[in-house]
Amino acid sequence: MDHALRRSRLTDELLGLGPKAFLVTHLPNVRYLTGFSGSNGQAVITADGGLLLTDGRYAEQSRREVPDLRHVVYSGDLAPVVAKACAELGVQSVAFEAAAVSHKLFGELSAVGLELVATDGVIERLRWSKDPEEVEHLREAQGIADAAFHTVVPGLAVGINERELALALDTEMRRKGADGLAFDSIVAFGENAAEPHHQPTARPLGRGDVVKLDFGCVVSGYHSDMTRTVAIGEPSGELREVYEVVRRAQQTGVDAVRAGATGAEVDKASRDLIAAAGYGSQFPHGLGHGVGLEIHEGPSLRAGGTDVLPLGAVVTVEPGIYLEGRGGVRIEDMVEVTLDGCRVIPTVSKDLIIL
């Protein structure tokens, strides 16, 4: 992974901003630009390299993970360390991530004499297009989620509760090689599936329930994200109809993805189909989002959104219909954006599985 090339793209962006250095404090951005994966790290990036800042817990790890930058191991307050680093680099004007620097830290950095220039989403936009190694990590993470689904779901039995199923999925992903969970797994039975982001409870599984599963894992810092809805015994006619509407809407959304499309255009393709079926008000969230070093990143697929999908982005397509008190259906895939369409990453079937 060529972190130096990524940093050079960032410093190219600096040319239009004025400062000669960029203070990076958002940990996923630090990892993207340097390879450092610890819980405390900052980088001061300049055209000729820069410095990685961390504390003594990560001295060895940072040397191993970031062999191509100078390191500063510090303790205590960050602001004087950044000021000294900038002095060593011969810079005084510094760009920073407005969303990642607290008001307190901003004041401390200003007090030590740095000239600060706020930026919004500069590094995040560089991360939208994935390089081949990033896509491989995403595919590996999704492969583990696929395998966990195929291991756990066929064994579902009446009486298991939502928390137990969530634990089984989480454990199986760990067993199959995940570094961690992408997010708290969403497991929802029956009427609970009407909540888009339901937290698992002790609600037991019964015949006729739909089961909504939204889960994923992390491999080398990269996240997977998939939703499938299955049925335990024959579902109601209404839920069968809803499943088919969501399945068609999801495929329509996938078919609309291509480099150069806007997130709003892709969202509309799915949303119009759901609205035409009479369920427009039961689809209350955006169609999808980018996935990578964070589970939710750009570009966004939502009504009115202006994000343009770049070649190499990985985004989710996840329409849903939620019927209060009765249940709900969501189907979600991560897809890789190509010039003339996209490549679907999960391999789990989207046909209705009845157990």
Image: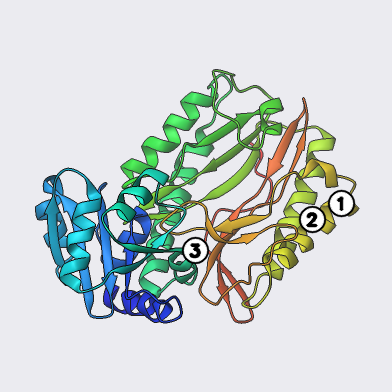
Q: Which of 21 and 258 is in front in this view?
A: 21
* Crowding at mark 2 (Cα within 10 Å: few <14, some 14-19, many 20+): many
Name the amino acid, label 1: Ala
Q: Is residue 251 left or right of residue 300?
A: right
Label 1 to label 2, Cα distance in Å? Answer: 6 Å
Name the quadrant containing residue 301.
bottom right
Looking at the image, residue 27 sits to the left or right of residue 296; the answer is left
Q: Which colour scheme is used?
A: rainbow
Of residues 328 and 21, the one drawn nearer to the viewer in this rendering? 21
Q: How crowded is mark 3: few (under 14 residues within 10 Å), some or many (20 or more)?
A: few
The amino acid type of the residue labelled 2 equals: Arg
Residue 169 is at least partly visible in this image: yes
222 in relation to 321, above or below: below
Q: Name the residue under label 3.
A: 121
- Tell me the distance, in whole angstroms, between the alpha carbons under discs 3 and 1: 33 Å
**Nearer-N-terminus badge (3/1):** 3
Q: Residue 215: horizontal and vertical position, in percent?
A: 50, 43
Label 3 residue SS: loop
Please report contact status of discs 2 and 3: CB closer than 8 Å, yes or no. no
The residue depicted at 80 percent of the width and 43 percent of the height is 242
**Gap between marks 2 and 3, in whole Å?**
28 Å
Q: Residue 127 appears at what percent x and percent y?
A: 44, 67
